[in-house]
Amino acid sequence: MRVYLAEDLPPELCRRLADFARERGYASSLEGLFWLPVPESLWSPLQREHAARCGPYVVSLEIGEDSLRLELLVRARDRLHCECIAPADSATRQALIDRLEELISECDLPH
């Protein structure tokens, strides 16, 4: 499994990111775990075909006290098993990492 890991971050930044994710409805039932939406433009053909049954598609983001762990597996939000659940391809992987980096930059600004 591929992941994007950022460690030794300022705890305040991680708190801001968690608050941001909660405010947007990305929180899961587990503390510190969030579901980031994958834009439709990045869905594979099979994911598009399965969208009505399996969508929306997300990736998991674990926000720790001073770290972030973005799992680069595109999941169906409400299904555990389906052939449309797959590792992010290179374009999706890069887009998701870029989006997380943007969020880090936004949340790193003083309020």
Image (cartoon, grey):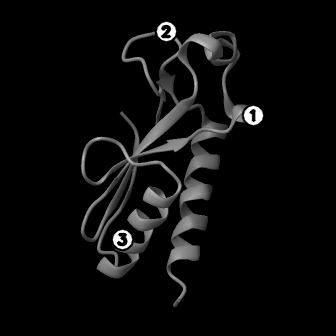
**Upstream in the sequence, badge 3 or badge 2?**
3
Front of the two marks 3 and 2: 3
Q: Quadrant of the N terminus?
A: top left
> In the image, residue 63 lies at what x, y percent?
33, 59
Left or right position of 5 against 38: left
The spot of residue 10 in percent (x, y) is: 33, 81
Residues at marks 3 and 2, CA–CA distance in whole angstroms: 33 Å
Q: Earlier in the sequence, mark 2 or mark 1?
A: 1
Numbered mark located on residue 66 in the image: none
Q: Residue at x 70, y 15 (%)?
A: 45
Q: Secondary structure at mark 3?
A: helix
Tell me where residue 58 appears, x and y as whole percent. 51, 35
Instruction: Name the residue beneath numbered marker 1.
Output: 41
Asked if the residue under mark 3 is in contact with the one under mark 1, i.e. CB atoms within 8 Å, the reply is: no
On screen, residue 86 versus residue 14, left or right, reads right
Disc 1 residue type (three-letter): Ser
Q: Secondary structure at mark 1?
A: helix
Q: Is residue 71 visible?
A: no
The label on residue 83 is: 2
Task: Say which residue label 3 marks.
Answer: 14
> Does the CB distance between marks 3 and 2 fall below 8 Å?
no
Q: Label 1: few (<14), some or many (≥20) within 10 Å?
A: few
Q: Is residue 15 visible?
A: yes
Residue 46 versus residue 52: which sits nearer the camera? 52
